[in-house]
Amino acid sequence: MAGDVGRSVVRSAGGDQAEILQGIAALHLGGEWFECDVTYGNGVFWRGLQEPARRFDIDPQVAGVEQACSMALPLADGSVGSLVFDPPFLTYVRAGREGNGKMVMAGRFSGYWRYDDLETHYRGSLAEAWRVLRKDGVLVVKCQDIIHNHKMHCTHANVIEWAEGLGFRLLDLFVLVASRRMPSPNRAGQQKHARVFHSYFLVFKRGR
């Protein structure tokens, strides 16, 4: 398009997570960077990028990360301008669960035993994000659709519904295409659903 000549275009899909995060910052943070990550993990999410000023995790793995659950953050009401929520997405996988607690995926990705567990964590964290974000603050949620109990769960659509129910407004949606096979807890057998090779970045604005 003629209007795109001479400037970089932020695209809605691609295989580079850093590029997507930079695009979100350019479009929706006014050139500023993300202030807070509430599910920091081991920091791979920010590889090659500037890290947020505040970093939280329920079980900190690296120095400088504050211990806190994403559903109960030690932050004042309306004190944050932007927040990133990148929770586990797998079910039938949970560290400590008898029978699968020693699985590689339980240690690498964490997860939930049932989809109800996932929903509880996601809803509680979205509500907490609403509390700590300022008016017009930006929330970024990374999520992935999954198959649980032989049923397709469109998690990204659920997150949009849960967030909008709180008063958030969806600003943008990005698709990150996997560069290699993504983890799955499913046992070997006849394939009944398409293998998921993408995840979503959902960008919301906190309403007034």
Image: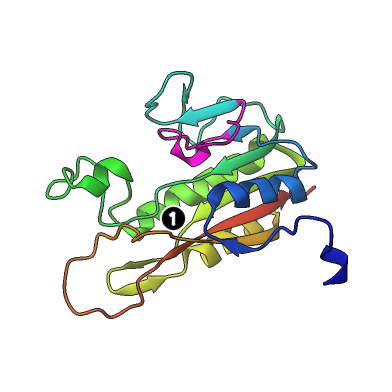
Q: Residue furthest top?
A: 63
Magenta-span inclusion, residue 52: yes
Where the N terminus falls, by quadrant?
Answer: bottom right
User: What residue is disc 1 on?
Assistant: 119
Q: Give the side of residue 4 with respect to residue 168, left or right.
A: right
Quadrant in the rendering for residue 169: bottom right
Q: Nearer the viewer, residue 122 or 40?
A: 40
The magenta segment: 37-53
Can you give x and y, in whole percent of width and height, for residue 174 in the image? 61, 60
Quadrant in the rendering for residue 167: bottom right
Residue name at image x 46 percent, y 64 percent: 198
Q: Give the side of residue 143 with respect to residue 188, left or right.
A: right
Can you give x and y, in whole percent of width and height, for residue 148 in the image? 31, 66
Look at the picture and state if 104 lies above or below 59.
Answer: below
Q: Nearer the viewer, residue 3 or 42?
A: 3
Can you give x and y, in whole percent of width and height, for residue 68 in the image? 46, 28
Residue name at image x 37 percent, y 59 percent: 180
* Badge 1 density bin: few <14, some 14–19, many ≥20, Cα 10 Å: some
Q: Amino acid at mark 1?
A: Glu
Determine whether the residue tagged by mark 1 lies in a helix, strand or loop.
helix
Q: Residue furthest left?
A: 99
Q: Residue furthest right?
A: 3
Q: Give the side of residue 62 with respect to residue 184, left or right.
A: right
Magenta-span inclusion, residue 99: no
